[in-house]
Image (cartoon, rainbow, N blue to C red):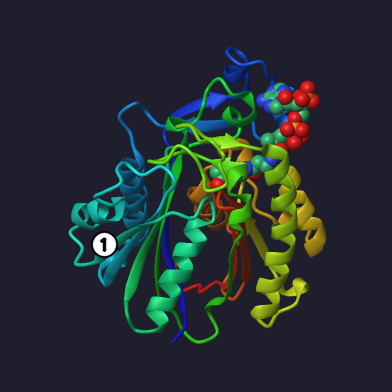
Amino acid sequence: MPAGLLALGTYVPEKVLTNEDLASFLDTSDEWITTRTGIKERRIAEKNEYAYDLAVKAVEDLLHRHGEEALAEVDQVVVATNAPDAYFPNTAALIQHRFGLKAAAYDLLAGCPGWLYALAQAAGQVEAGIARRVLVIGAEVLSKITDWRDRSTAVLFGDGAGAAVVGQVPEGYGFRSFVLGADGSGGSALHLAALAHSLPDGTRMGHKIYMNGREVFKFAVRVMDTATLEAIEKAGLEKRDIRLFVPHQANLRIIDAARERLGLDWEQVVVNLHKYGNTSTASIPLALKEALDRGLVKDGDHLLFVSFGAGLTWAAAVHTWYGGAA
Ligand code: ACO
């Protein structure tokens, strides 16, 4: 049987940081941020709130929406994050313990596409019979690794988490294709040091996010186009078959370029980056839940996901929605 999404929950911290708030301590303006990115505000975790805490709240939301049985057969937990609490133990193991699951657990680091990479792992393992159900979480506290003096990155990111359960769905539903890719030659465009001071190419790294925005922008527009088309083709579908496009929420101009190439109307595109900014691995689950809550997703709809990020990496997927799930 195919694998697909069965349950979803999300969480964003309460604290709101608006563009005006940023302009009070950075040389920037609401006008610049809005026209260049589409972002109006973002959520910021409390001092003592970390990826684990956000992930727990996203799973609690999932349980609230779907009931305790949603986690009943979960035998693997994957947390995709670029801002883990610790090198080890992995955040997923802490989640396994917190919810009393009898499950394997690991974290996955693949930039913003991490949640889609984790869904691919989960779907493959369910289809291969290695796992029955997998809890796939994206959780980020990017505010803690942002250089708040750097206006070119500080205006972009936000904190949040999303959690989904992947399991068997009836024939004709679930994931129809995955496209995953990486090009490490672009690693120096977006980096944050762990133990080493420099990348193999000699690029010096610091302990806050560094990004070459223009380079990432060009890369993003290119891979959003190629990866989505490849995912649609692999799924055996045409562009016109896509009902809803749920892209990574990084920049409205990047989303618009992809929307145009796909020939989609704005009503077919989920956008919520004006409220949350770029929440990295949490961005697609946050957007998907919003689409579900707004009644935009119906049984049998083909959904298209795409993301890009540090690595550089990219991922796209086509999923046919199972109405019996949510
Ligand atoms: N406020 C005001 N001015 C600014 C700001 C700001 N916040 N940031 C940069 N500027 C200035 C620059 O200094 C530059 O000034 P100059 O011309 O005098 O040098 C000018 O604005 C234009 O800068 P650009 O970098 O060319 O602006 P651009 O239109 O490319 O937009 C942006 C910058 C928004 C960062 C864009 O390049 C972008 O979105 N890139 C993709 C980023 C992205 O999606 N990253 C996702 C990473 S995913 C992950 O894994 C974390």
Q: Is mark 1 within 8 Å of ligand 1?
A: no
Q: Position of residue 286 (x, y in %)?
A: 51, 50
Amino acid under disc 1: Glu
Q: Position of residue 69 (x, y in %)?
A: 27, 67
Using the image, determine if residue 45 lies above or below residue 314. above
Q: How many marks?
A: 1
**Camera-side residue: 31 or 80?**
80
Q: Identify the image quadrant of residue 150.
A: top right
Using the image, determine if residue 308 lies above or below residue 32. below
Q: Is residue 312 left or right of residue 121?
A: right
Q: Position of residue 285 (x, y in %)?
A: 50, 54
Which residue is depicted at the point 38% across and 78% down? Answer: 126
Which corner quadrant holds the N terminus? bottom left
Q: Identify the image quadrant of residue 50.
A: top left
Using the image, determine if residue 96 lies above or below residue 197. below
Callout 1 secondary element = helix
For the question of whether residue 179 can be seen, the reply is: yes
- Disc 1 marks which residue? 68
